[in-house]
Amino acid sequence: MVKAAHAAAGVELEEAAVFLELHARVDDQGNRVPHLNCLVRAGTQYGWRAVGQLLAAQHKIRVDFSANVRNWYGGFVYGTVASEHKPREELDASPLQWAASGIPIPFCEVLPPKWHQGERQPKLSPLQAYDLCTRRQVRNEAEAWVVAKAMEREGQRGLLAFLLEHTNVEGFIGKVVFASQCEEEARRQQSHVQCVLVMNQKRQLEHKQICMYVCIYMLHCCVLGFVCMNVCDVIPCFPFVVVSRS
């Protein structure tokens, strides 16, 4: 079907491979819907639109063309090597192959043995690289390469791939450090503001306590003065006689 659509579009294929995998979309029962990935290789470069229109018109098949697979080798890696998002048990154990010569090249001869022993580890995105550098407290380009090489020895090459393809590693690490410094400075300012608020609350409480003590003291003085005045009203005043000797 795919070969015939290419031929009708004037494209002569040299090789093709079809992989069955589970789609992210699910059916009414909650099962993931299977779909086919078709990898093709032609002798000359061509556009996909004509092939897609023929498949839709003749077979009512809607096709999407991947922007991530850029060559024949990358398509083999995508279809036959496990990854973080596609575990080994979800790979097609028996993909279909076709070749114009009549003898397709076996997958084991297309990919090196290391690809069949582990998982695909794609290049980290800028956000993933930022999170990793922040966790590892990377402060300059040299430290970034040291961390990347250490992770490579552990079988994790995502950061190394990111650094190798980045055009300005020093600038990227500078942004990571600057972001961390801004966060730390904001945290310090927030802590300072909280300290000032606590001190102000403490001073207000002390002021209220002083005002309360003053009010109590003044009330106490008023009560004592009132008692003294009442005592003076009750006790009679006796005249004093001064006797002088002549």
Image (cartoon, rainbow, N blue to C red):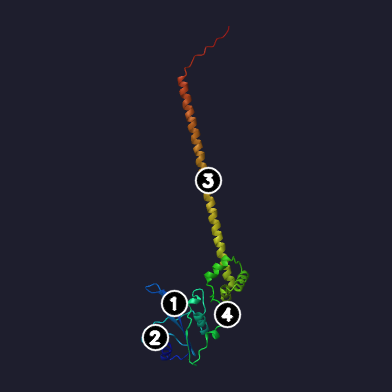
Question: Residue 47's spot in the image, x, y percent?
Answer: 45, 86
**86 up-or-down from 221: above or below:** below
Question: Residue 233's spot in the image, x, y percent?
Answer: 45, 21
Q: Earlier in the sequence, mark 3 or mark 1?
A: 1
Pointers 4 and 3 in contact (C-beta within 8 Å): no
Q: Which mark is residue 202?
A: 3
Secondary element under disc 4, as helix, strand or loop, is helix
The residue wearing badge 4 is 114
Label 3 – label 2 distance at C-alpha: 77 Å
- The answer to which quarter of the image holds residue 166 is bottom right
Q: Earlier in the sequence, mark 1 or mark 4?
A: 1
Q: How many marks?
A: 4
Label 2 – label 1 distance at C-alpha: 21 Å
Q: How many other residues sit within 10 Å of disc 2, few (<14), some (14-19) or many (≥20)?
A: some
Q: Amino acid at mark 4?
A: Lys
The label nearer to you, 4 versus 3, is: 4
Q: Which mark is residue 22?
A: 1
Image point (49%, 38%), residue name: 212
- The answer to which quarter of the image holds residue 178 is bottom right
Q: Amino acid at mark 2?
A: Leu
Image point (47%, 26%), residue name: 227
Q: Residue furthest top?
A: 246
Q: Earlier in the sequence, mark 2 or mark 1?
A: 1
Q: Which mark is residue 55?
A: 2
Pointers 2 and 4 in contact (C-beta within 8 Å): no
Label 3 – label 1 distance at C-alpha: 64 Å
Image point (48%, 32%), residue name: 219
Label 4 – label 3 distance at C-alpha: 67 Å
**225 up-or-down from 237: above or below:** below
Q: Earlier in the sequence, mark 2 or mark 4?
A: 2
Question: Residue 202's spot in the image, x, y percent?
Answer: 52, 46
